[in-house]
Image (tube, grey):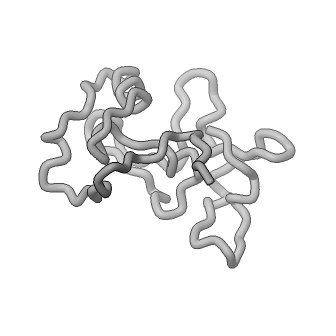
Amino acid sequence: MLFYWREAERESSREWTVPRALTEDFSAFQRCMKGTNAKHFNRCAALKGRVGESVACSIYASRPSPCREFSASLENGVRSTRCDEARAAHGLEPLRRSDWAGLAVPELPPGTRPAIPGEIPAP
């Protein structure tokens, strides 16, 4: 999970900063979360809990851009193939609409859709 190195640098213009202690250098311009650079058995240093039981990001408000761009399946009413594949890799079933019952999930205005990760917005 790579992101631009400045996301881990404090800037007054940004509301959030990825905690640098949880990151490592990947290249001259990129950093990654510790634990995500391993080929096998990678696990983000910010992930707390046990996958399949109870898990959460310990830096959710300060998470890097790849995490901000990743949508959970049906979070906004749209299925996420990436989420479904990630869950399957851990032996979990895809999320269902009922999994979101009782949770505060923002509604999208009619005629809009959530941003697709990596998509460049139209001017």
Q: Residue at x 73, y 50 (%)?
A: 4
Residue 104 location (% of width, % of height): 22, 60
- Of the pair 105 and 9, the residue shown nearer to us: 105
Q: Is residue 16 left or right of residue 76?
A: right
Q: Residue at x 72, y 46 (%)?
A: 31
Q: Is residue 104 left or right of residue 73?
A: left
Q: In which quadrant of the rendered image does the C terminus lie?
A: bottom right
State how many labels appear: 0
Image quadrant where residue 58 sits: bottom left
Residue 114 location (% of width, % of height): 41, 47
- Of the pair 122 and 53, the residue shown nearer to us: 122
Q: List the single residue furthest toward the right.
A: 28
- Of the pair 60 and 41, the residue shown nearer to us: 60
- Of the pair 95 and 118, the residue shown nearer to us: 118
Residue 15 location (% of width, % of height): 58, 72
Can you say whether 103 is above or below 97 in the image?
A: below
Q: Residue at x 58, y 68 (%)?
A: 16
Q: In which quadrant of the rendered image does the N terminus lie?
A: top right
Q: Is residue 122 left or right of residue 115?
A: right
Q: Residue at x 66, y 57 (%)?
A: 21
